[in-house]
Amino acid sequence: MNARGKREELLELLGALAGQTIAPEQHARLERTLVEDAEARQTYFDYMDVHFGLHRWQLCDREAQPLDELREQLAGMPAEPPACSAPVGQRARYALVAAATL
């Protein structure tokens, strides 16, 4: 196999590894390649560095998204809470349910 074919195969194996779809025979072939070829090892480290960097970046966006949504929801709320319009009897039932729950 020529150098281009070996590199394409290596990238295919790395993609399967990163995507967690690598088969046992593919994993064995990847291990052999990494043991035998220093350039393949460097490609492996570079590939994984980029993969995990993108993963971390994606997680940072996910962590910020709920906070941004909460800020938007809070910004839309009135400064003063609305006056309670429930009848006294209904409020008493809510209080009894809350007390029974506790």
Image: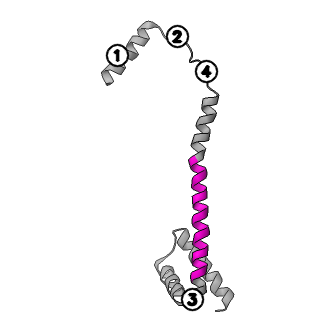
Pinpoint residue 50: horizontal percent, then vertical percent: 62, 68
**What whole-number distance in Å separates the C-alpha atoms at marks 4 and 3?**
66 Å
Q: Do residues under tags 4 and 2 come within 8 Å of each other at their CB atoms?
A: no
Element type at marker 2? loop
Q: List the residue tagged with mark 2.
A: 85
Q: Is residue 54 magenta?
A: yes
Q: Amino acid at mark 4?
A: Ala
**What whole-number distance in Å separates the C-alpha atoms at marks 3 and 2?**
76 Å
In this image, 93 relative to 28: left or right?
left
Q: Residue furthest right?
A: 4
Q: Do residues under tags 3 and 2 come within 8 Å of each other at their CB atoms?
A: no
Q: Do residues under tags 3 and 1 come within 8 Å of each other at their CB atoms?
A: no
Q: List the residue tagged with mark 3.
A: 37
In this image, 49 relative to 99: left or right?
right
Q: Please tell me which residue lies in front, 52 or 94.
A: 52
The stretch in magenta equals 41-63
Residue visible at 65% across and 81% down in the picture:
8
**What whole-number distance in Å separates the C-alpha atoms at marks 4 and 1?**
29 Å
Residue visible at 59% across and 67% down in the picture:
51
Q: Amino acid at mark 1?
A: Leu
**What whole-number distance in Å separates the C-alpha atoms at marks 3 and 1?**
74 Å
Q: List the residue tagged with mark 4.
A: 79
Q: List the residue tagged with mark 1.
A: 96
Badge number at residue 47: none
